[in-house]
Amino acid sequence: MHLRVDPRGENRKKTFIRRAGKGVALVLGLFAVLFLGLAAWTKLTPAPDGVLVLEYHLVDSGPVDAEGLAYTVPPEEFAAQLDVLQREGYTAITMLDYMKARKGKAVLPAKPVILTFDDGYEDNYTEMLPILEAHGMKAVVYMVTNDIGQTGYLTWDELRDMQARGIEIGSHTANHLPLTQMDPEQREKEVRDSKLLLEWNGISTVYSFSYPNGAYDDSMPEMLRRQNYLTAVTGDAGINTFATNPYELQRVNIPRPRFGLAEFRLRLWKAELMTRFGIHQHIER
């Protein structure tokens, strides 16, 4: 038996493929035009002034489990990112520097950046700190206090030495549990106990806070004020000014790079675009 192929069906298939290909090309072309237009616009118009805050976790070249991989920036990549920041004129400051300027007690550099590190991993001392010092920069480390001295985390001696070398130590709660899932009394205990424990063990007055998992609600700024914190960082990208709510500061996540410095620059650009378009910007009312 001989099967016959309907030429009309074959022609319809070819026509569909051609049209689909043209549609994809059109969408890609429009995307490219939009991207290039945005890039030209941001290049030709003044960039938003303010303080850029970057969020890191681990800086490590050793073996990392699957969960930690996305949060780990290799040391050579981290050093290259700092090179980019310095070439673009950024000066590293701390959260306390920002608050002093906000209160009129200091003047910020022309392009300030705050490098922050969540959780308090030991590689922040063994890997990150030497790279930072080689670049003449400083940072803020947000410590989960009940992890201090545990395997893979900073010790008290390391924390005190980091502080003596220009690193600001902040709180990331006592147990790194989402505050939004706790009752008010538990929340207050997490932020109060972590602050007190740090200060009782030789850390200077703790003024800075990082919400675990970036989770917070409208009640938390007032809670942090009661506990004498001055700043808190979120996970929402953007650039901070003196009009930004100090308990809802914008911060750009810097995960393990898949596309090298191009990806890093895109993340910096994302902060600029979010600020320009007013997307998830936490301005005090």
Image: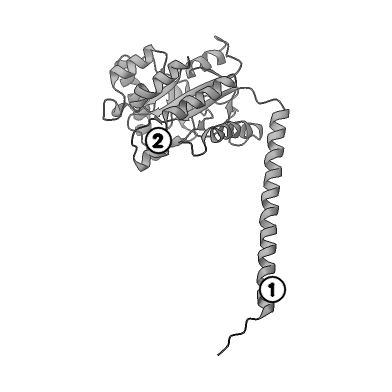
Between residues 60 and 170, which one lies in front from this camera angle? 60
Kind of residue at badge 1: Asn
Between residues 234 and 218, which one lies in front from this camera angle? 234
Kind of residue at badge 2: Leu
Query: Label 1 to label 2, Cα distance in Å?
Result: 61 Å
At label 1, counting other C-alpha atoms closer than 10 Å, the crowd grade (few under 14, some 14-19, many 20 or more) is few
- Determine the residue positioned at 52% across, 38% down: 259
- Determine the residue positioned at 55% across, 10% down: 106
Q: Which residue is mark 2?
A: 179
Q: Secondary structure at mark 1?
A: helix
Q: Position of residue 17 (x, y in %)?
A: 65, 65
Q: Position of residue 183 (x, y in %)?
A: 37, 37
Q: Quadrant of residue 19?
A: bottom right
Q: Which residue is mark 1?
A: 11
Q: Is residue 138 above or below residue 43?
A: above
Residue 222: tell me if it is visible: no
